[in-house]
Image: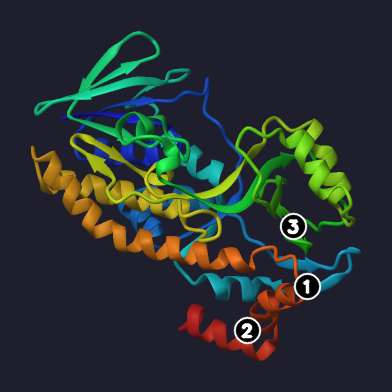
C-alpha cells in the first residue's frame, strides 16, 4: 500500500512514521525548500504522549523537552505581579506531559523517517483526482503520483483541503486574535535562564520563553478583528506593541535579525467530515484546535497513530478505516475545540478586572497549600 502525504510538519511526519511501521510506502511532499524549525513551546501530553510511546519516539522527545523553573507574570512597568514555581507548573501539567518546542517535535520525527521515506521539498500539490482504485496527485514538479491514500497534513491554510473539500472560508472559524512567534538571538537580561516571563495589557500578551539549550522564543498574541495572514509582522507588531514597556522594545528589536516569523490569525477549522473517498485531512488541516486549547501537537501525533492503527485493522478497505478513525478521534478534537472557544474570552482581555479574574486560578495555584494539594493529587498520587 502507498500513501502520498502533503506537508512535512508534525502531522505529516508522524503519519509517515506510523504508516512505515505498518508496512506502507510513503511519499512526503513539502512546499518549503528545507525543513523548518523553531515555533513556540507546547505542552505535549494526552493521546500524543501515549502515541509517542507506542511509536518509539518518546525517549527522543524527552531528551528535547525543557523544564520551566519559574513562570513570572509581570505588571506593565515590569514589576512582578506573581509567579509559579517549578513544582506548581509540574502539578498543573501532570505526570505524562512535557514542555517541548514544536520544532523539536519535528526534528525528532524527521530524524526517524528521513532515511526510509521519500521526501520532496520545494514541491506543492496542484490537482487531485481519484477513482475506486487509487488517488492521483498532480505535483508542481510536473509529475503525477498514484497512491492508495492521500493525506493532507498541510496546515491551517491547506491546499489539499481547498482542492478536495472547497475554499478555506467555508470552514475557517476566526477567533479574532493574531499570534506571532520567532526565535531571539539572545535572551533579554531581565529574563532569568530557564524561566518564562509574560505580560498582558490592553488586550495584548507578550512572553519570552526559555526552551532549553540557551534558546529563547518571543511570543505575541493580541485581540483584533482586522488581522489577515498576509500582514507584515515587521510593520504590524511595532504598531500594536510599540507603547508597551518591560522587555518589549528589546524583543521587538529582535525582529530585525530573526530568521523567520510565524504570524497568522488564530482560527479553527470546522468540518463535518475529514475524509472524502481516498483523501483524508490530518492535524491543523482537519481541525486546528488553536493555541487556546494547547493540544495541537499532541493531536497531530495521536491522530496519526490512530490513523495507522485503523488502516492496519482494515486492510484493503480505505473507507472503512477512515470512518473508524474519525469516529474514534472526533470526540477528543471537538472537546478541545470547544475549550479553545471558551478560552478566547479570557485570553489577553482588555478589561483589567477580567484580566485579574482570568489570572486568579493561577494566583491560587501559587499559594503553598494549593500547590501542595496539586502536587499530591497530580504528581505523587
Residue 64 is left or right of residue 360, and the answer is left
Q: Are marks 1 and 3 in contact (CB under 8 Å)?
A: no
Identify the residue shown where x is 22% and y is 23%. 129
Neighbor class of circle 2 (other Cα within 10 Å; few <14, some 14-19, many 20+) is: many
Neighbor class of circle 1 (other Cα within 10 Å; few <14, some 14-19, many 20+) is: some
Identify the residue shown where x is 70% and y is 50%. 219
Secondary element under disc 3, as helix, strand or loop, is strand
Spatial distance from mark 2 to mark 1, Cα to Cα?
26 Å
Which badge, 2 or 3, is on the more N-terminal residue? Answer: 3
Residue 23 at x, y percent in the picture:
19, 35
Looking at the figure, which quarter contains the N terminus?
Answer: top left
Residue 197 at x, y percent in the picture:
76, 60
Spatial distance from mark 1 to mark 3, Cα to Cα?
12 Å
Residue 174 is left or right of residue 69, and the answer is left
Looking at the figure, which quarter contains the C terminus?
Answer: bottom left
Q: Nearer the viewer, residue 23 or 337?
A: 337
Q: Circle 2 is placed at which residue position?
A: 371
Residue 150 is left or right of residue 252, and the answer is left
Q: Circle 3 is placed at which residue position?
A: 204
Amino acid at each position: 500500500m502507498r500513501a502520498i502525504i502533503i506537508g512535512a510538519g508534525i502531522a505529516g511526519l508522524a503519519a509517515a512514521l506510523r504508516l512505515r511501521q505498518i508496512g506502507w510506502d510513503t511519499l512526503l511532499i513539502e512546499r518549503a525548500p528545507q525543513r523548518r524549525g523553531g515555533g513556540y513551546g507546547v505542552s505535549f501530553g494526552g493521546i500524543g504522549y501515549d502515541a509517542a510511546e507506542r511509536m518509539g519516539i518518546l525517549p527522543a522527545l524527552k531528551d528535547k523537552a525543557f523544564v520551566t523553573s519559574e513562570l513570572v507574570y509581570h505588571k506593565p512597568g515590569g514589576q512582578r505581579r506573581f509567579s509559579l514555581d517549578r513544582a506548581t507548573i509540574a502539578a498543573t501539567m501532570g505526570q505524562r506531559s512535557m514542555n517541548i518546542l514544536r520544532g523539536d517535535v519535528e526534528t525528532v520525527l524527521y530524524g526517524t523517517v528521513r532515511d526510509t521515506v521519500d521526501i520532496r521539498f520545494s514541491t506543492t500539490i496542484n490537482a487531485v483526482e481519484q477513482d475506486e482504485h487509487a488517488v492521483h496527485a498532480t505535483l508542481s514538479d510536473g509529475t503525477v503520483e498514484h497512491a492508495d491514500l492521500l493525506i493532507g497534513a498541510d496546515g491551517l491554510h491547506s491546499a489539499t483541503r481547498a482542492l478536495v473539500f472547497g475554499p478555506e472560508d467555508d470552514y475557517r472559524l476566526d477567533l479574532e486574535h493574531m499570534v506571532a512567534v520567532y526565535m531571539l538571538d539572545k535572551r533579554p537580561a531581565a529574563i532569568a535562564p530557564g524561566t518564562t516571563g509574560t505580560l498582558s495589557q490592553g488586550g495584548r500578551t507578550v512572553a519570552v520563553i526559555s526552551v532549553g539549550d540557551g534558546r529563547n522564543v518571543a511570543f505575541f498574541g493580541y485581540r483584533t478583528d482586522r488581522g489577515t495572514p498576509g500582514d507584515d509582522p515587521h510593520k504590524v507588531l511595532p504598531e500594536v506593541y510599540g507603547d508597551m514597556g518591560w522587555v518589549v522594545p528589546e524583543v521587538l528589536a529582535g525582529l530585525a535579525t530573526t530568521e523567520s516569523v510565524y504570524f497568522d490569525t488564530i482560527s479553527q477549522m470546522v468540518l463535518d467530515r475529514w475524509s472524502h473517498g481516498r483523501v483524508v485531512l490530518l492535524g491543523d488541516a482537519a481541525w486546528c484546535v488553536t493555541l487556546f486549547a494547547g493540544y495541537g501537537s499532541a493531536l497531530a501525533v495521536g491522530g496519526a497513530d490512530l490513523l495507522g492503527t485503523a488502516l492496519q485493522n482494515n486492510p484493503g478497505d480505505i473507507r472503512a478505516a477512515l470512518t473508524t478513525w474519525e469516529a474514534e478521534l472526533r470526540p477528543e478534537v471537538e472537546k478541545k475545540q470547544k475549550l479553545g472557544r471558551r478560552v478566547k474570552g479570557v485570553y489577553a482581555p482588555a478589561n483589567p478586572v477580567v484580566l485579574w479574574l482570568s489570572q486568579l486560578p493561577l494566583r491560587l495555584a501559587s499559594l503553598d497549600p494549593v500547590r501542595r494539594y496539586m502536587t499530591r493529587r497530580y504528581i505523587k498520587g
